[in-house]
Image: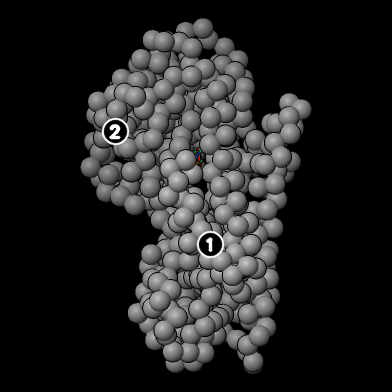
Amino acid sequence: MYIAVIGSGYVGLPTACGLASFGNDVVCIDTNKEKLKLLQSGIIPLYEEGLQELYESVKENLKFSGDVSDIKKAELIILAVGTPMSDDGSADLQYIYQATQDIKPYLQNGAIVATKSTVPIGTNDEIERIIDRSDVTVVSMPEFLREGYALQDFFNPDRIIIGTDNISVFNKLRNLYIQHIPSEKIIRTNRRSAELIKYASNAFLATKIQFINEISDLCEKVDADVADVAAGMGLDTRIGRKFLNAGIGYGGSCFPKDTNALEYMANKNGVKLGIVSSTIKGNHDRRFNIAARINKYISDIDGDARVAILGLAFKNGTDDIRYSPAIDIIQNITHNPIYVYDPKAMNNAKNVLGANVIFTKSLKDCVKDADVIAILTEWPDFKELENMTFDKNTVILDYRNILDEAIMRKKPHVTYKRIGQKI
Ligand SMILES: NC(=O)c1ccc[n+]([C@@H]2O[C@H](COP(=O)([O-])OP(=O)(O)OC[C@H]3O[C@@H](n4cnc5c(N)ncnc54)[C@H](O)[C@@H]3O)[C@@H](O)[C@H]2O)c1
């Protein structure tokens, strides 16, 4: 199949490379000239494990272009542009509607337009209205990939939801995947249900994170250990262990904006989603609570403390810092300077963090002579701390609970604190 992907970001690029690897001819369109320049010179301009290598292996079938008329031959056009959060919490749909206007003149007869961007209920009706062609079918095909596992999720998804009432279009899209993905994972729903499945899924996962974080706060007061509580809860197959890691709260380009957009949609329809609203507020407050905790440890140090922060990305495996709790926390640490390190997100963070932040070259440089070290992103690289020795008294705040507790507690000069244990 000849496929066009509109938007070459965290979703568009893995999707384009993955579909090209299935033998399709793919053109990936983007309006960002800087990004295009890199892509056209063979460089994937974001970090996602294995993506550069996959691109190298499929580049015969994959072309990048800034010229939207290159979609003319495409039977399938996938919309994968951003839908960021507006000031009022709703999804900002300007990019999706602009992309729709852009492709409209070049759609061939019988083209399928599939929206992978996360869009509020009814957005695909509006896309259909803008295109205004009875031969073109607009489908909701929400994307569920996780940054850091994008290729794993592309090649082994939990499900592919195809939201359309048009059975022959469903079959065409199903055929795109059927040789590579078990058929029972490919599900047809109506278009609006597909749109809502995406929001409901993200809100549920965000709620699970907020739930364990609240339980974690209780653990700290009653001398229980949230790691044990989560492990014990997770063994119940009805609950499951995933998304029960207490920490500093969720972030990224999806959960914050999608929970807010869902709340906005519900309010507009006169429905109260109390659990979602409480999750949004609790998660927002958490980053300030964590910053306050770090400030307290810093203020307890005699003399001028050296402060090291490990982790800037909203989670490991990505360079994405959108709505990263680590960034908000650093911005609320009342200390100067703050030494920071992240294996992949330094360049992105340089654009947003202030002059009080010193970007170091390595984990070792960052934590050298530190009085307080806080781990804010769960990069496995930070486990190297387990092998280090500390010559002076150092407080290590493991706010992702990634280090081996037994090892860290035995280290001379180290006061080791985890999240969800008695403070
Ligand atoms: N990032 C994720 O993990 C993830 C997962 C699932 C779903 N989603 C959803 O997928 C959508 C895309 O997310 P993303 O993280 O890939 O965004 P992104 O910001 O990384 O990429 C979007 C790209 O679209 C380009 N673009 C904007 N307008 C365009 C136009 N008119 N024509 C061509 N290109 C255009 C931008 O330049 C950018 O490169 C969002 O709706 C998001 O909610 C994201």
Residue 221 lies, with reference to residue 160, above or below; the image says below
- Could you tell me if residue 131 is visible in this image? yes
Residue at the extreme top of the image, as rendered? 134
Residue 338 lies, with reference to residue 347, above or below; the image says below
Front: mark 1 or 2:
1
Residue picked out by circle 2: 20
Looking at the image, which residue is at 29% across and 33% down? 20
Left or right of 157? Residue 340 is right
In terms of secondary structure, where does tag 1 sit?
helix
Point out which mark residue 226 bears: 1
- Could you tell me if residue 66 is visible in this image? no
Where is residue 289 drawn, in percent x and y? Answer: 68, 65
The image quadrant that residue 9 belongs to is top left
Q: Amino acid at mark 1?
A: Val
Point out which mark residue 314 bears: none
Where is residue 97 drawn, in percent x and y? Answer: 59, 27
Density class for disc 1 (Cα within 10 Å; few <14, some 14-19, many ≥20) is many
Left or right of 324? Residue 17 is left
Looking at the image, which residue is at 70% across and 36% down? 273
Q: Disc 1 and disc 2: Cα gap in Å? A: 43 Å
Asked if labels 2 and 1 touch by Cβ distance under 8 angstroms, the answer is no
Q: Quadrant of the C terminus?
A: bottom right
